Amino acid sequence: MTGALGIYNYWIYVLLMMIGLYGVIAKPNLIKQAIALGLFQTGIFLYYISMAVVDGGTAPVWTTILDGAQKYEGPYDNPLPHVLILTAIVVSVSVLAVALALIINIKRAYGTIEYDEIEAMDQADKRADYQRGQVTDAADDVEHRQEGHHHA
Amino acid sequence: MNAVVLIDTLLLLLVTATAVAIIEVRSLYASAILTGIYSLLMALVWVNMHSMDVSFTEAAVGGGISTILLIGTLVHVGREEKPIKKRLHVPALIFTALTGAALIYGTLDMPRFGDPAAPIHHYRVPEMMAQTVGFVNGTPGKQKPPEGFDLDRYRRFDGRVTGPIPDDPKDTAWREKSILQTEGLMVPQVRAAHEPHAEEGHHLHPPDDFNGHVPNSVTSLLAAYRGYDTMFETTVIFTAGISLILLLRRPRREGYLQPGAALSDQVILRVVTKLSIPFILIFGFYVITHGELGPGGGFQGGVVLATAFILYALIFGRAALYRVVPPPVSDILTGVGVLIYSGTGAACMLLGGKFLDYSMLNPAVPGDGESLGMTLVEYGVGLTVSMVMLTIFNQLAEERST
């Protein structure tokens, strides 16, 4: 395991992260984006767990206590990245769940979960509001109303 | 090239291919199923890297829960992606290629895969693993220092006792003169921490003297060294459960449930489900309880427990599930889990120790106190995780009237 093969795992982590990133940017479907975000996360998990590996090592459970008689002197893999990633996985499913809940609400409000369509509907709404002279967007509100006064 | 590396290489190629398929396949339903396959492959990768706890979690969460959640959502939002005219998004491709190239350039400096001399294995970690062994951390209730041992000379800025602090940082002679060293009190991890630039072939050892210490070092790091972190991760999950309730739950006056379709007319599914649910529950409790001895713990066990309830709901309908676990009960239990965790920490304080200093639960035998504390904490985590997963499933499966 020397040369390029020695850091092969780290290249795969970059690849997975970039596949996820591509999905988030290129796919307008919100469900796809949520899944792609998950791929991005697993890339990072792979990076951490790869760092924990020690040549010839085994799972970091001190078996000495269980057997008593025989003593395994190591090496063991580094347990710290395992701890970090174990909790990160459960948090990632919570993130996915909240994202899905928001997507369901978006579907209810807009009737679609394609980002470009949602954007187009928002723009169309805004344009219609401008034409009617009532602006719902708080930032434009004051300015536009003053403008309306002027014309009146 | 040995077998482990070969398997690792093949698995990672499969994982990458699956990831591309997940992004590119047009049917969202296929994408969700592929996500489950991806997670199971990832679980195999973790096993291959000896990360049993992570593998456990990945299989239960990724292969089980998130696939169910995705499919549950697709019922509401439609299972087909809108056809895109251009298949390849060129700006995104250029952007990701550049970012990827920069990251790969960064990896060229990394220590090679499995290098025992990598800094990650020597900076702080050995001390972490040694923290509850001997009197290295100077906490009362642990092994007493010998007569005439000047603890304060060895106390570091963070209150832990690892070795004498030299006046001149370049002076290394103190290591040889160290009482910890000469009296044979320094456990190998601490010794390794004193020699940061370890020679090739140096590796992490188990502590010499366990004092009844918890054998699964992943659990002991999770619940002791990173106890605060784990507590707030549990809180994050609790918050996710609350968010789902706020976002999707129907008002109580409308009732929690709209009648939904169940597969209950399928006799084989009903029988198999009823047979397997007790075993899933026993396995879940086993995983939580056994977490300090071997791979497993509150996060993994909690998810396994939740799958039993979710399976019941899928086959017998959510009306049946709500008779077993009414929503108010699961809501309250979600909070009770966090309360058990922080309550254990508070109990340690009331007994005279620091927050989450489990050895205070049994000062006579600190190792037993640690085991007890960690088991309590794991049950708290398990309760919160299982009830939040159940809540998330219920809310995503629900068809709101408004």
Image (cartoon, coloured by chain):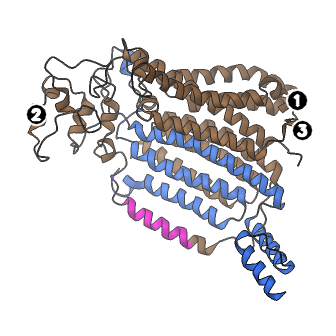
Chain colours: A blue, B brown
Mark 1 nearby-residue class (10 Å; few <14, some 14–19, many ≥20) = some
Q: Which residues are magenta?
A: B94-112
- Sequence-wise first label, 1 or 3: 3
**Sooner in the amino-acid sequence: mark 2 or mark 1:** 2
Above or below: residue A125 compared with residue B343: below
Q: Which residue is mark 3?
A: B254
Helix, strand or loop status at disc 2 = helix
Q: Residue at x 32, y 27 (%)?
A: B206
Please indicate whether residue B236 sits to the left or right of residue B199 in the image: right
- Decide: few, some or many residues near mark 2? Use Cα within 10 Å; few <14, some 14-19, many ≥20: few
Q: Report the front residue among A35 and A122.
A: A122
Mark 2–mark 3 Cα distance, whole angstroms, equals 75 Å
Q: Quadrant of the C terminus of chain A?
A: bottom right
Q: Which chain is mark 1 on?
A: B
Q: Nearer the viewer, mark 2 or mark 3?
A: 3
For the residue labelled by badge 3, is the local secondary structure a helix, a strand or a loop?
Answer: helix
Question: How far apart are the two marked residues, 2 and 1, measured between alpha carbons?
Answer: 73 Å
> Per the image, is A147 magenta?
no
Q: Are marks 2 and 3 on the same chain?
A: yes
Q: Which residue is mark 2?
A: B176
